[in-house]
């Protein structure tokens, strides 16, 4: 289990990542005004493709944000660093590399 200092560093990393994700979502019009696409563009297929790419990106960012917020909630509850699948501790190196991870390395590939 990570030490108190390591948990503080991981919390800081998670909070920074959360802020960055929220900024990226705001730039895409999530949580504020909706992003606009030029509907009069000569190639409507390109507009549709851009809209599709933006939706995929937004979904990925929201998934990452959910993982970060879940990890922060686990820190508050004292359950951070425990694999959601097998219940074993998640290795410190994995937590440092991926602070929002939900699974240990053995369960991540399942």
Image (cartoon, helix red, strand yellow):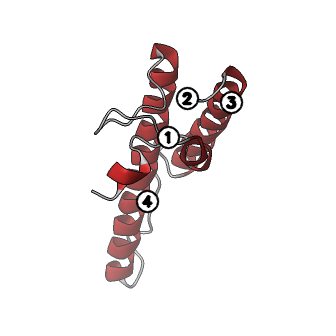
Choose top left, top right, bottom left or bottom right for residue 12.
top right
Indicate whether 70 appears above or below 95.
Answer: above
Q: Which residue is mark 1?
A: 100
Q: Nearer the viewer, mark 3 or mark 4?
A: 3
Mark drawn on residue 36? none
Indicate whether 34 appears above or below 89.
Answer: below
Kind of element beneath mark 2: loop
- Mark pair 1, 4: CA separation: 18 Å
Mark drawn on residue 1? 2
Mark positioned earlier in the residue sequence (2 or 3)? 2
Q: For this rendering, which residue is in front, 58 or 36?
A: 58
- Mark pair 2, 4: CA separation: 34 Å
Kindly indicate whether the residue at mark 4 contacts the one at mark 3 (C-beta within 8 angstroms): no
* Residue in the image at 56% along x and 44% along y: 21
Mark positioned earlier in the residue sequence (1 or 4)? 4
Indicate whether 37 appears above or below 31.
Answer: below
- Mark pair 1, 3: CA separation: 14 Å
Mark positioned earlier in the residue sequence (2 or 4)? 2
Q: Which residue is mark 3?
A: 6
Q: Nearer the viewer, mark 1 or mark 3?
A: 3
Q: Nearer the viewer, mark 2 or mark 1?
A: 2
* Residue in the image at 32% along x and 81% along y: 45
Relative horizontal placement of residue 88, taking residue 35 as reference (left or right): left
Q: Quadrant of the C terminus?
A: bottom left
Choose top left, top right, bottom left or bottom right for residue 6.
top right
Q: Which residue is mark 4?
A: 57
Kind of element beneath mark 4: helix
Kindly indicate whether the residue at mark 3 contacts the one at mark 1 (C-beta within 8 angstroms): no
Mark positioned earlier in the residue sequence (2 or 1)? 2
Q: Position of residue 65 (x, y in %)?
A: 47, 40
């Amino acid at each position: 289990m990570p030490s108190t200092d390591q948990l503080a560093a991981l919390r800081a990393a998670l909070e920074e990542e959360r802020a960055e994700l929220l900024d990226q979502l705001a730039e895409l019009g999530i949580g504020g005004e909706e992003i606009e696409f030029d509907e009069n563009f000569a190639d409507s297929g390109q507009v549709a493709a851009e809209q599709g790419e933006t939706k995929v990106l937004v979904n990925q960012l929201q998934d990452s944000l959910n993982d970060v917020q879940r990890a922060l909630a686990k820190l508050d509850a004292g359950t951070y660093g425990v694999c959601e699948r097998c219940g074993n501790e998640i290795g410190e190196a994995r937590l440092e590399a991926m602070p929002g991870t939900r699974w240990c390395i053995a369960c991540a590939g399942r």
